[in-house]
Image (cartoon, helix red, strand yellow):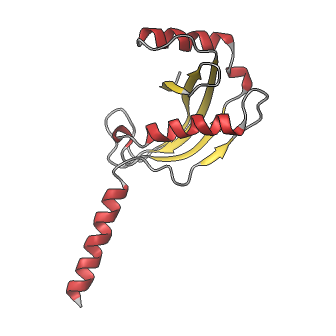
Amino acid sequence: MKKIISLLLSVVCVCCMIGCAKGSVSDVKIDYGTSSIYSEDDMNEAIEIIKDKFNTGSWRGFELQSIAYSSDEKCNLDNLGWLRDLAEANHMSDEFTQCIMFESDFHTPENASAEWNPDADYENYQWWLARTDNSEWELLSWGYC
């Protein structure tokens, strides 16, 4: 019986470690806000890109808690110009015609790397995306701008 319990505990520990191999996006609260520019489908396409980024190794053990559309006011010509300049500097297309920004809240793991406070909550972390005439969104910037 002790061997069976030990085996089961080992399996549970391995499963927990595998689950921490990337960021957690399973229980994310989504706030679409109100937009006269973008549909919920438009926003979902952008949110999936953010979630995909959050699932990369650099976000290992982080828990994404919420994503919220910022506002239509952030989707202005000044921000679009900034994103075009950023894309050009990174040898990407600079012909973007639309931009969108989301803010997220997340929690860091206890063993967070040096640039993050361990076991801490971060709020209003920005994610900036752009696209050309309803093409696919491209994630161009993230962080505190």
In the image, 74 versus 138, the foreground residue is 138
Residue at 69% from the left image edge and 15% from the top image edge? 76
In the image, 103 versus 72, the foreground residue is 72
Question: In this view, which residue lies farthest toward the bottom?
Answer: 1
Which percent across, then down, holds residue 34?
77, 35
Compared across the picture, whether 118 is left or right of 64 comes to left
In the image, 136 versus 119, the foreground residue is 136
Count of numbered circles in the view: 0
Q: Choose top left, top right, bottom left or bottom right for residue 115.
A: top left
Is 132 rendered above or below residue 94? below
Residue at 24% from the left image edge and 91% from the top image edge? 1
Which percent across, then down, holds residue 19?
37, 57
Which percent across, then down, holds residue 33?
73, 37
Residue at 59% from the left image edge and 9% from the top image edge? 81
Which percent across, then down, holds residue 102?
61, 32
Q: Choose top left, top right, bottom left or bottom right for residue 135.
A: top right
Residue at 56% from the left image edge and 25% from the top image edge? 129
- Residue 34 seen: yes
- Residue 122 seen: no
Compared across the picture, whether 9 is left or right of 127 comes to left
